[in-house]
Image: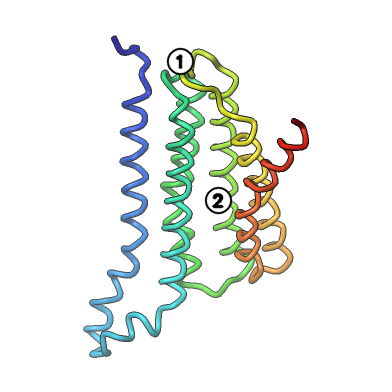
Amino acid sequence: MKSERSSERLMFFTDAVVAIALTLLVLPLTELVPELVAEHAPASEAITHNWAKIFSFVLSFAVIGRSWFTHHRTFEHVRAYSGPLVAANFCWLLTIALLPFPTQLIGAYPPDRFTVVFYLGTLLAGSLCHTVLVFLVRRDPQIRGDAEPVSDETLGNFVLSTGVFVLAVVVALIKPGLGYYALLLLFFPSIISRRVLRRRL
């Protein structure tokens, strides 16, 4: 018999919001077509004259995809929801639903301090919310039920990833154009947390 506080409906709702956010990302690109037709411009200009918009779309699509995947992995440890878990999940969804807005800004404007910090700040807020989710799942046995607890490595990955977003925002405040490059450090948290755990063992 399923728990009355089963997390399934929360997961279905979350997946729907993420899917809508992914769809909204492409709208600025589809709006280019009637503009090109009205100007009698060749179709190739949709690509050659809009690299910034294409880059912002691909970047945010990858970011949301990665966020959804890690969120899904987190909820593999969830059997029932709690009030704090729902609140943290909705805060995370807020950052996902908001992301198409700063994505459109960075695609339409040069990489100035406001647009880059707004974009990276949204990613930072999402990472913080997700880290809170992991802490809640890890600490509350009623949420986990019979599922395995969140590992130290997974928790370390989220904490370090949030640190990378903090660093990216700081870099963007100093040198906006370099803020995106700091995101490349997201490849390293899993390696670092794995090595730290090996030393502790």
> Residue 105: where, in percent of width, then height?
48, 65
| 18, above or below 27, in the image | above
Please name the amino acid that badge 1 sits on.
Asp
Dot 1 corresponds to which residue?
Answer: 146
At 45% from the left and 42% from the top, the residue drawn is: 94
Element carrying mark 1:
loop
Label 1, label 2: how far apart the Cα atoms are: 32 Å
Element carrying mark 2:
helix
Residue 54 vs residue 41, the one in the foreground: 54
Residue 135: which numbered mark, if any?
none
Q: How many marks?
A: 2
> Residue 168: where, in percent of width, then height?
66, 57
At 66% from the left and 37% from the top, the residue drawn is: 156
Q: Residue furthest top?
A: 1
> Residue 107: where, in percent of width, then height?
46, 70
User: Comparing marks 1 and 2, which lies closer to the viewer?
Assistant: 1
At 57% from the left and 44% from the top, the residue drawn is: 125
| Quarter occupied by the N terminus | top left
Within 10 Å of the Cα at label 2, are there few (<14), some (14-19), or many (20+) other Cα atoms? many
> Residue 189: where, in percent of width, then height?
65, 48
At 45% from the left and 57% from the top, the residue drawn is: 62
* Image quadrant where residue 39 sits: bottom left
Please name the amino acid that badge 2 sits on.
Leu
| 147, above or below 172, in the image | above
| Quarter occupied by the C terminus | top right
In the picture, measured across the screen, residue 201 lies left or right of residue 103, that is right
Dot 2 corresponds to which residue?
Answer: 123
In the picture, measured across the screen, residue 130 lies left or right of residue 2, that is right
| 193, above or below 201, in the image | below
